[in-house]
Image (cartoon, rainbow, N blue to C red):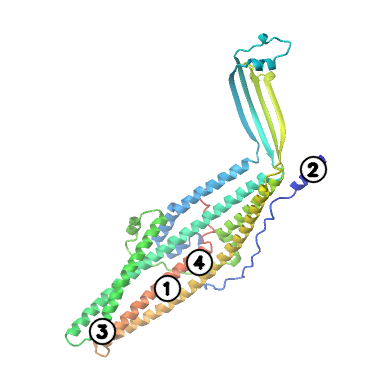
Amino acid sequence: MLSLLLLLLVSLTSCSLAPKQDLPDISLPQEYSQQIPDGKEPIEQAEWWAQFHDPLLEELMQEALQKNFDLRSCVEYIKQARSALWAANAKLAPEVDAFALAAKVHPSQDLTKALIPENLPVEAAETSWKNFFLWGFDASWEIDLFGKNLQAKNEAKYTLQATQEHSRSTRIFILAETARIYTEIRGAQTRLQIAKQKEATFSALLELSQTLFRTGIGSGIAIDQIQAELHACRGRTPMIEDLLGQNMANLALLLGTTVQDIKQRLILPGRIPQALGKVPLGLPSDLLLRRPDIKEAEYGLYAAGCAVGSAKAGLFPSFSLTGILGGASRSFPNLFSSGQRFWFAFPTINWALFQGGKVLASIQNASAGHRLAAIQYEKTVLSALKEVETSLINYATNSLSCQELLQEGQAQKSFLRKSLQLCETGLAPKQTILRAYTDLFSTQENYLRAKEQAMKSLIALYKSLGGGWENLPPPPGNS
């Protein structure tokens, strides 16, 4: 009967208790629905922001990689995960401890009676204080027959890899956020410049109209229209300044610095980075290798499978070998002599036969976690595809809007010049100039917004593609 049981145990160890580690089969399209005409131009994707030729932006990006709080936290998370892997690896090896003891022993009379021979008088036994010395090593080794500790070690390994991929994902997010906020700051500064120019223009028109009205040439309606435009311009200025201040504060937190520092460095307005659209799109299936969040979900799925195997191993007994080697003597000089040495070794079996369903509950919990990890993996892949598609569409539509608004602005500038010439000769009313200025400023603002949105959608596209994945240095904490 014992032989059959051992044969059964050995046969069980020949197959893994963990579920089969297969990724869910996800059908991905052959290409993206929206394409970028010049998207296959070569570009150093590891530093995609360098193509904008903005030295201050490049400086801020490098500073974000060094000082961002989330990235610094990722270093510690990786160290924690690596320590957990070391601890899991240690359970596969034997444990060896050393011990030593030096004591004064004074046995009681009852103990002496129990230990001396019956034919020897108690008075003959020595009951005075005696020295006692002991030294030795004890070792124990759990034989991982059913792979419980091995599965725990693999789970820790995949958890470490998932943590490293999370660090990469955080890096990409921080870089994209830095570029996005910087773009919004430059956009807000440019809108403030347009607002000041608009206010100055309408203030001059208002003064001119009031002068003409006092001489009996102008119209009160024109004055009301100009004042309405002037008040509308002044009303939007505080909102732009508020948005600018918020973005300054957001960028300061992102870079781990103060708002005053950011304001000092961005005190001079600059242009919005130019979105060039140089993106090596590749195939949708490339996302499975390029996106760190997908890799993180993949390793999370593997770790969950190992947790199932470790939980199932709880159904079977655990086997251990324990041994002790040492020496004992009443005299310290003789403590290490061969005659004072002792040793013994013994195997142990521990089998939890009844725990009120605790092991089965842990298996069910681990299995549910494995199924959840598979669902999360599918969701992550499809979410990544959706992000790329959305960013491509947004970039295409905003780029087209920029082109049309740019041509519209050129036409309105021409219309404004001709209107000014006609008004000087008296062939056109003053309202024509007001309408020309109003339309031109409105188009400039719309063009600026479209340009800013195009840049932000391009940043989102780099982020959704796993921007900079090819040549990124190893995640922090790898050394």
Residue that badge 1 annotates: 450
Tag nearer the camera, 3 or 1:
3
Label pair 3/2, CB-CB below 8 angstroms: no
Q: Position of residue 95 (x, y in %)?
A: 64, 35
Query: 429 or 46, which lies in front?
Result: 429
Mark 3 = which residue?
222
Q: Which mark is residue 5?
A: 2
Q: Which mark is residue 475?
A: none
* Residue displayed at 57% across by 53% down: 162
Which residue type carries mark 1?
A: Ala
- The residue where tag 4 is placed is 461
Is disc 2 surrounded by few (<14), some (14 to 19) or many (20+) residues within 10 Å? few
Is 363 or 401 nearer to us in this picture?
363
Q: Residue furthest left?
A: 215
- Using the image, determine if residue 1 lies above or below residue 446: above
CA–CA distance between discs 2 and 4? 60 Å
Identify the secondary structure beneath mark 3. helix
In whole angstroms, how far apart are the C-alphas of marks 3 and 4?
47 Å
The three-letter code of the residue at mark 3 reads Ala
Q: Separation of disc 3 and disc 2 at Cα?
A: 103 Å
- Amino acid type of the residue that numbered disc 2 sits on in the rendered structure: Leu
The reply, left or right, for residue 58 in relation to residue 29 is left
Q: Amino acid at mark 4?
A: Leu
